[in-house]
Image (cartoon, rainbow, N blue to C red):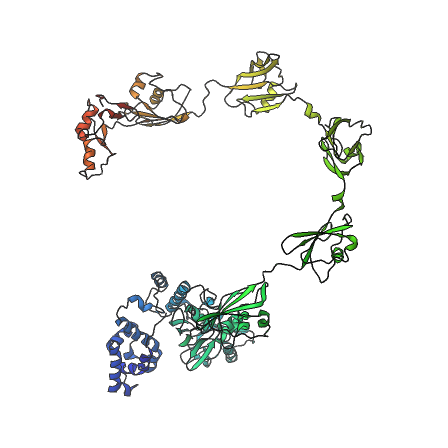
Amino acid sequence: MRIRFPQLLSVIVLLCFLLAALTPVAAQVPDTRNNPSVIAQINSTLAAKGLSQEEVKERLKSKGINIDTMSESEIMQNRSLIEQTILELENEKKPGRTNRDKDGYGGKTLPDSAQRKVAQVFPAADPAVRSKSTDETGSKEPINTKEEAIADVAQKLAVQVVPKVGIYGHDIFFNQSLDAFRTTDGARAPDTYILAAGDRIRITIFGMSQADLLLEINKEGYIQPTGLKQLYLQGVTLGEARKLIGQRFSAAYRFQQDQYAVTLQTARAITVNVFGESNLRGSFNMSALNTAFNALAVAGGPSMQGSVRAIELIRGKSRKKIDVYAFLSNPATQFDFDIQQNDILYVPMAQRVVSLQGAVKRPMKYELTGTEGLQELFGFAGGINYNTYVEMVQVERNQADSVVLLEYKLSDVLNGKQAVVLLDGDIVRVRENTRPLERFTEVEGAVFYPGRYELQKDMRLSALLMKVQLMPEAKNDFFFVERLLRDSTIKIIKVAAAETGNFLLEPRDRVQVFNKALYANQDLIEVVGSVRAPLTRAVPFGEQVPLTDIVELAGGLLPTALEQAQVMRRDVMSPGKVEYFAVDLLKPAGFKMQAGDKLIVYDKRTFLQGATVSIAGSVKDTLTTLYSPTLTIPELIKMAGGFTRSATAARLDVFRLGYGENGSGFTLFELEVDSSYNVIAPATSFTLLPFDKVVVRDLPMFNLDRTIMLKGQVKYPGVYALESKQVHLSDVIEQAGGLNPLADRRHALLIRPYNKRGLIGIDLRKALARKGSARFDPVLLQGDTISIPAYQNTVGVRVQGTRQADLINAGLRTDSLRLNSVASFIYASNKNAGWYIKEYAGGFASRADRKSVTVAYPDGSVRGTRNVFI
């Protein structure tokens, strides 16, 4: 827990006198307790803080400390808690002090959520160390203290409040690179850890003797092994203690030097004070395992303006400088900064901060000390990038009332030839080398190794051609060089082969080496159609290739190839002129093909007029297939997967195509088949002909899963199957056991999804009175829903256009009735619509259109009114 101690030094100066004055044990401090001047000075000091001796003693008793019964040494051992108690009482007296400020840290208050988390882990107010387990010796191992838990929450809060930018080195304290050790992290203690009272050591022997001991260093600095002399370990490092313990225990136990282990089981808790330019300031309780760097991390590290190069670790009169940059370059140095009880960490203001920008590994702000200058700055930044412009580095500096820009040669700075001193606030800029590649030449075309090459001094074209190695098919009697001029235009230079040894190349020259094929007079021979490997080949002008050779080059003819082929010949000298030659592939008669010819080999199947037959209707798969005289009706039905469940064998329709000079048309044949699909009528045999269309018909009145839903006032509502295609509403009501006594016979509804018909009003009185009537007793369809409501005996009046509406508009109605509301009333028989408006809505409004009155019935029907009775 962090404790704030404003003006605490004045209290500590008088603490010894104060404790003595509050202690009635005269034998221990006879002079002080009976010294009136000292007592007066103490009372005066407490009074200045708004406190009294009795207040201090009562608060200490509430924390379990009764100084009336304590010796002087016990009082001094509890000195820090007494100091804290005096400070708490003083802070409580200050105006504007809240209860939460008692557990504050660094002037900041733990958020309520953080306090709740700490309270869940440590529900009791006592900050004493808790116990979590008991070993075989009966000793208990402490777990984290409440103070450590609050310090942990404080560190996490510091991560939230500390800005994410600043001087290089700030971030390691709030990006969780460093974390605080717990008191129970003793096994991680280094050999350099300095032991003190409160540390618990585990000694394990596994030689001829066996032992596992857990010993605590007492207040005098000793451990007391059973049966051995006590061993003083106060101020001894863990590595040294391991040797001393081995020597002492070898007198009573038998083991070799590698058969025992000494580890720190539980580290003591200490208080470390952090002051200066840190994000959180004050005192922090933590494990002695921590180094100064861990303590700074708990305090959130240096603030934005806090130094990372001149932090001081103050222990008594000694002061030790902490350089975070040295730690970052060698993390092992953190163990040189161990912390002890009441150590002070002071973070001064950063004095010389410079900003490094541009082409370096780590551009950001850096703190410099002593004689460090520009060269050291680049070392802290990790060096320059691969593409840094090393000819210049700029320094922007504020001087008096102006800003100046200084320039240096970066390469001289880096190699130490020029030392540049930097001032606070300097901005150092390093540029990238953005110049494109210039001293190169490029080769493309008919060479083995095309691409870019270094342009050496006085390099000739012949030397470049030797590097890239010309292909055999390269045209080597001349070459073209494309030269980019300063005005971005391109100059094309033709270089003869004999001149390549004298032709000087310039930067960014591009050499073109052409293929001889580019200059050859040739055209294509093509073979397409019914061959195994259609091809395209280039042939020089004037060369002729036998037709048989071309066919063989195309893999030969397919079995379905037609013997008669055709050659299309283009006249390469007269574009657009084409000739066609019919050739017999079996008797080519010495026909030869030339450049520009195209051989077309036809397939016999192309010339066939294939006939089909088809089957549709109540079969599992609609099918169209090629006609064959051997195809029969039974086979065609089987090819279609057979009949469906709804198919009838008594009716197969065959539509036969007939055509002549007067046109075409279909003739219908009606067939009947048996269970094996054999035709049994009108004749025992029926031959299919090309383009016949067979249609299998459905069974008459076939129904499958046709249902309706009956809801409301019937004896047995629910789902009903439509037994035939002519099921009337009255039939279903009769199946449902008839209507209930409460059924509203006038206002039933039929909801029909078919063709999105929606609501249909029905009058059950007429439907049941005239069963089977097409007008009043409708035939039901698949998916219909019949809803028969209960008789409600109410009438509704919409208030708009009535005097009720006038009252609403005038604000005289305070209930929930609105202009578009419908007010409901008990039905009165033999009354017309006007009577209800007058009786229940106060009559028509002055501007009401009385002729527009309509009556809407529950079945969806609407009627205009002229003495309409409801």
Q: On the rendered image, what quadrant is the N terminus found in?
A: bottom left
Task: Mark yes or no: residue 135 visible.
Answer: no
Instruction: Describe residue 113's horizontal placement relative to residue 609 as left or right.
Output: left
Instruction: Describe residue 789's horizontal placement relative to residue 688 as left or right.
Output: left
Q: On the rendered image, what quadrant is the C terminus found in?
A: top left
Q: How many marks?
A: 0
Residue closer to the observer: 750 or 382: 382
Instruction: Describe residue 296's horizontal placement relative to residue 802 as left or right.
Output: right
Instruction: Describe residue 92's horizontal placement relative to residue 682 as left or right.
Output: left
Task: Mark yes or no: residue 606 visible.
Answer: yes
Residue closer to the observer: 861 or 408: 408
Q: Quadrant of residue 150?
A: bottom left
For this orientation, the residue located farthest to the right is: 590
For this orientation, the residue located farthest to the front is: 487
Residue 479: image location, x then y, percent: 74, 51
Residue closer to the observer: 364 or 403: 403
Residue 481: image location, x then y, percent: 71, 53
Residue 836: image location, x then y, percent: 19, 27
Q: In which quarter of the image is residue 838?
A: top left
Residue 386: image location, x then y, percent: 59, 63
